[in-house]
Image: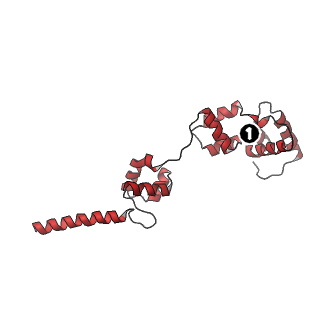
């Protein structure tokens, strides 16, 4: 597919005919034929509409597109689905909602607590944990602090909540020292 290629008169004539009488074809078929992206086809069809060309193409979702959405569900992102279908992200997201397809949700630290604790215990940096679990780093840091999880902080190479860690360490050392003095 060639990007930003100027449209020839022949391509525009073909597209006008296709837009007025799609005959079961979709933007993907036309994009393949014209060696363009589905998004470029849709964009030009919208432009033709603004110029007064009557089109039947973009009025509704085809059965093929709906079946493709169902088949792609959970396998690729909504953004990738939109690119493949030559539709906008919001159009695909809306149609997915109408069809009752699973919506994408960003992972949150709260739902991954056990994994976070395990990786922190293994000595991974916060950034490494965020990357490994595909979490937002700042959300992870807030969660770690709120839950009191000891985790190495990437930027300063020290424990998050260092004051609490030192306080605990000093108390332990003090108890050990006093026990040794009493028994020694």
Q: Residue at x 51, y 54 (%)?
A: 136
Classed neighbour count for the residue bearing mark 1: other residues with Cα under 10 Å, few (<14), some (14–19), many (≥20): some
Q: Secondary structure at mark 1?
A: helix
Residue 115: image location, x then y, percent: 41, 49
Position of 54 with respect to 63 (left or right) is right
Residue position marked by numbered label 1 in the rendering: 28
* Count of numbered marks: 1
Colouring mode (rainbow / by chain / secondary structure / one colour): secondary structure
Residue 162: image location, x then y, percent: 36, 65
Q: Is residue 62 above or below residue 81?
A: above
Residue 7: image location, x then y, percent: 84, 48
Position of 105 with respect to 142 (left or right) is right
Question: Quarter holding the C terminus?
Answer: bottom left
Q: Is residue 17 above or below residue 132?
A: above
Image-quadrant location for residue 23: top right
User: 10 or 142, which lies in front?
Assistant: 142
């Amino acid at each position: 597919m060639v990007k930003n290629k100027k449209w020839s008169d022949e391509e525009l004539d073909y597209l006008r005919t296709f837009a007025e009488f799609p005959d079961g074809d979709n933007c993907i078929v036309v994009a393949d034929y014209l060696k363009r992206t589905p998004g470029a086809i849709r964009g030009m069809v919208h432009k033709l509409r603004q110029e007064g060309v009557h089109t039947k193409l973009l009025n509704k979702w085809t059965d093929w597109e709906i079946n493709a959405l169902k088949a792609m569900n959970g396998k690729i992102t909504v953004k990738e689905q939109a690119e493949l279908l030559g539709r906008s992200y919001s159009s695909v997201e809306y149609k997915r909602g109408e069809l009752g397809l699973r919506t994408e949700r960003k992972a949150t630290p709260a739902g991954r607590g056990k994994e976070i604790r395990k990786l922190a215990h293994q000595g991974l940096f916060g950034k490494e944990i965020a990357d490994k679990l595909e979490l937002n780093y700042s959300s992870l840091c807030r969660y770690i602090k709120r839950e009191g999880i000891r985790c190495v902080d990437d930027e300063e190479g020290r424990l998050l909540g260092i004051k609490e860690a030192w306080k605990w360490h000093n108390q332990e050392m003090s108890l050990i020292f006093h026990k040794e003095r009493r028994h020694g």
